[in-house]
Structure formats: C-alpha cells, structure tokens
Image (cartoon, rainbow, N blue to C red):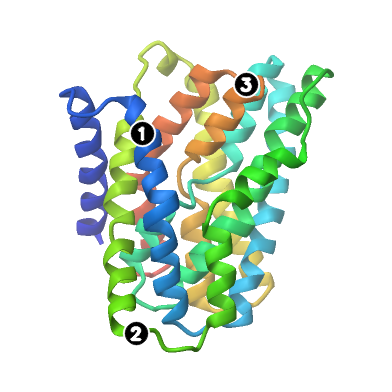
Amino acid sequence: MFDTVYSIVLMVLLGYGAKLLGIFKESDTPIVNNVILYVCLPCFIAHFVMNCSLDREMFMTPLVAIVTELVLIFLSLGVCRLMKLPPAMTISVVMTACFANTGFVGYPVIASFFSDPKAIPTAVIIDQFGMSVLMLCTAPVLMRLLYKEGGGFSAKDLAVFFRRPAIPVFLLCLILHGLPLPAFLNNTLETVGKSVVPLSMLAIGLNLRIDRKLLLEMKLLTVVIIFKFVFSPLLVYAGVRMLGLSQLIGNVAVLQLGLSSAVIAGIMASDNGGDKAFASQAVCVTTLLNVIYIPVCAYLLEIV
C-alpha cells in the first residue's frame, strides 16, 4: 500500500522538481494537460471499457457523487455565511471544499489500488458524469448569486466539457462493447493509456505552488480539509451503503470522491470571481495531504 502512495508522491515531486530546476515551466502545464486529455486519456478509457464487463451498479455511482456534492455545497455555503466571508473567498472555499480531483489524481490512485477490471470504468463514470458536469455549473451560478450581477451558467460552460474526447470515446466504447479488438490496436491503447498515470502526476507537480503568506489562512484551509477528507468520504460511504452497491464499486467511489481538491475547481473559482490565490493554495495543500488520506482510507475500507 505505502509503495503505491510513495510512488504517486514521488512522481508529483519529480514534476515540482523539474519546475524548480527550470526544465519545465508552470506555463507548460496546459500542454501536458492537453496531451493527457486529448491523447492518453481516450486510449486509457477505451482499453479498460472494451476489455471489462459492465454492470448497472457502475452507472449508479454518479447519483451518489452528485447528491454528496450538493450536500457539501449547501453545508459549505452555510459555514462561509457564519464566518462572514466575502463573495470571492466564499466561491473559492466552496469550490475547493466540494469537488475532488477524480481525474488526474483519481485515475492513478484507482488503477494502483484495484486490480479488478471494473474499477477503472467505474472511476471514469464517476469523474465524467458524477463530478465534471456539476463542477462546471457551480462556479458561474455562485458568481451570479453572490455578486448579483453578470456571470451565470451558460451552455458554453458545458460545451467545453462535451468537446473533450473522453465522453464521446466512452459512449462509443459502450456501443462497441463486446466486440473483440485486433491485438495491435488493443496493445496500442494499453501502451498509450498507461502514460496517463505518470503524466497526470507530473502535471500536478508542475502546478504546485506554496505561498507561505496564505498558509496563515489556516482557519479557511482547515474548513476545506475537513470537508474534503472527512465529510465527503463519509457521505459517499453512506450513499453507497443505502443503495446497496457492491464492495468494489462502493470502495472505488469512497476513495475517489474523498481525494484532494480538483485543480479544475480552483481554476473555475478563479475565473468566476473567486479568490485565485486561496483557491490555488487549497488545491496545493490538499494534494499534498493525499499522502495521509489515501493510506488511511484504504486501510479503513480494507482495500489492502
């Protein structure tokens, strides 16, 4: 178990070290992200979906994810109101407290801990349908509600989501599921898909920034940490048990949805009137805290 965690942390540190040494710049992160999103991830999804058995349980996990996120949004808004936070900080706290990095961190973690071929398709369904859609909608809506001017959700926000090849590839693989793939094609998908894990970790490392001044905002960071690593997995655990999902599907959902704050959530907060500095710092701190959350959660779920 710890070998897996150490490996993930080391890959993140390699990316961070490469940035410090000037080998890569933080501005290179979008290029790496595009390689992952438009090349490696579609191959990753296609290989696993085409070579595994699918069942209805997998498609129930987005319901658990969305209900959990809605509960967390209302709870975090209540906390922000009690703390009398300004709109900018409220948006950043809510976004980083409620949405997990189910993709760039989630896929590598699930791939490392679960050997069952159903695990990765479940993780993809959770990320694409249970996390991404609501995350893209929330920040614009919060901006409109809190600032009472401009902003607001539009179809363009979802258009960005559907332009990414992950969803079309996933749907195409569902249609073609059961058809045998030629060996050369299957091997190509597998080989290219394997690069998702190291590239995702390197991209996170390139994006890490530690601002000592913002570490003084420990009260707000603590709120985000508690929501991410305590409330979120507990709510997901309750949800999967209420629906009677199998241990494998339930464990994937709990582990994945309790991970660190999504990088995209921080970006969405910054682009929609949120506090950019705090959002970035919350993503950084929670990403580093994965080294504690992952083994503890895995132990409690008896994955190892």
Indicate which disc residue 38 carries: none
The residue depicted at 50 percent of the width and 76 percent of the height is 247
Assign a secondary structure to mark 2: loop
Mark 2 residue type = Pro
10 Å neighbourhood of mark 3: few (<14), some, or many (≥20)? many
The image shows residue 101 at horizontal and vertical percentages of 48, 46
Is 181 above or below relative to 77? Answer: below
Point 40% across, 42% down: residue: 33
Q: Which residue extends farthest top?
A: 213
Q: CA distance from mark 2 to mark 3?
A: 48 Å
On the image, the x and y values in percent for residue 22 come to: 18, 23
Q: Where's residue 269, x and y in %?
A: 60, 28
- Amino acid bearing label 3: Gly
Location of mark 3 (residue): 274
Between disc 3 and disc 1, the foreground one is: 1
Mark pair 3, 1: CA separation: 21 Å
